[in-house]
């Protein structure tokens, strides 16, 4: 899905505002990452990543090998697998991140942060339906996991072009945690969306259907 093809005509300021909010729960580098069709583009000259974002940090191969060795030595330990997923996520190597997150989640299936990070990685590999299904699992584990709901709204808006669904997800975040970073981000998204689409969520006029 290309952002410019959105049939809802989302204002450019709205797109720029929330494109970088989709982040995992555990990554060390919370750099803004563009929607998936843009992040796949080749890095721009001058050491910047796709869409003008800073280039992802290089992988510390020594640390990667150390964590892989730990994972091999202890097949029942989710921690090194989760850390490997985080490292690959930060490096924007989402296919590798998915592999390690899936492995970690098999060992730690009730971890909502880990489940949500996997869902985010699915989205960045153009798998919106899998991302939303994974977010549902996260919310089955922890129904008030606001970071999941924030990301759920973003995938609904950008991946599925479902602004009503996105609005409901963000409203729930604001309701649960209005002063948290997630609540503030959701409020800004809602304000921008309603500015661009004043009739969003309004009852249909009689005879309009």
Image (cartoon, rainbow, N blue to C red):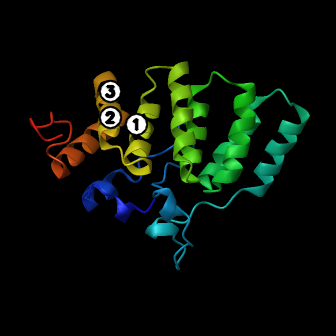
For the residues labelled 1 and 2, the Cα–Cα distance comes to: 6 Å
Residue 50 picture location, percent across and down: 50, 68
Q: Is residue 163 above or below residue 105?
A: below
- Residue at label 1? 150
Residue at 73% across / 44% down in the picture? 99
**C-beta proximity under 8 Å, tags 1 and 3:** no
**C-beta proximity under 8 Å, tags 3 and 2:** yes
Under tag 3, what secondary structure?
helix
- Residue at label 3? 172
Q: Is residue 190 left or right of residue 133?
A: left
Q: Is residue 26 visible?
A: no
Q: Quadrant of residue 204?
A: top left
Residue at 54% across / 70% down in the picture? 41
Residue at 79% across / 28% down in the picture? 77
Image mark for residue 170: 2
For the residues labelled 3 and 2, the Cα–Cα distance comes to: 5 Å
**C-beta proximity under 8 Å, tags 1 and 2:** yes
The first of marks 1 and 3 along the sequence is 1
Q: Residue furthest right?
A: 73
The quadrant the C terminus occupies is top left
Q: Is residue 206 above or below residue 4?
A: above
For the residues labelled 1 and 3, the Cα–Cα distance comes to: 9 Å
For disc 1, the neighbor class at 10 Å (few under 14, some 14 to 19, many from 20) is many
Residue 130 picture location, percent across and down: 57, 41
Q: Is residue 60 above or below residue 193?
A: below
Residue 151 picture location, percent across and down: 44, 39
Q: Is residue 74 left or right of residue 185?
A: right
Q: Is residue 20 left or right of residue 185?
A: right
Under tag 2, what secondary structure?
helix
Residue at 42% across / 29% down in the picture? 146
């Amino acid at each position: 899905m290309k952002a410019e093809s959105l049939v809802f005509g989302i204002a450019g300021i709205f797109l720029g505002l929330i494109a970088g909010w989709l982040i995992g729960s555990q990554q060390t580098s919370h750099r803004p990452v563009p929607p998936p069709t843009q992040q796949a583009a080749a890095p721009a000259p001058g050491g910047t990543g796709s869409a003008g974002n800073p280039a992802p940090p290089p992988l510390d191969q020594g640390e990667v090998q150390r964590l892989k060795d730990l994972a091999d030595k202890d097949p029942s330990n989710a921690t090194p697998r989760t850390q490997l997923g985080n490292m690959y996520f930060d490096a924007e190597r989402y296919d590798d991140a998915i592999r390690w997150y899936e492995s970690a989640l098999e060992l730690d299936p009730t971890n909502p942060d880990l489940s949500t990070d996997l869902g985010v990685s699915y989205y960045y590999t153009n798998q919106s339906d899998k991302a939303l299904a994974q977010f549902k699992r996260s919310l089955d584990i922890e129904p008030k996991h606001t970071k999941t709901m924030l990301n759920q709204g973003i995938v609904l808006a950008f991946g599925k072009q479902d602004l009503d669904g996105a609005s409901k997800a963000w409203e729930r975040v604001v309701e649960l945690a209005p002063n948290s970073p997630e609540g503030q981000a959701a409020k800004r998204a809602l304000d921008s969306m309603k500015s661009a689409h004043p009739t969003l969520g309004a009852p249909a006029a009689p005879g309009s259907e």
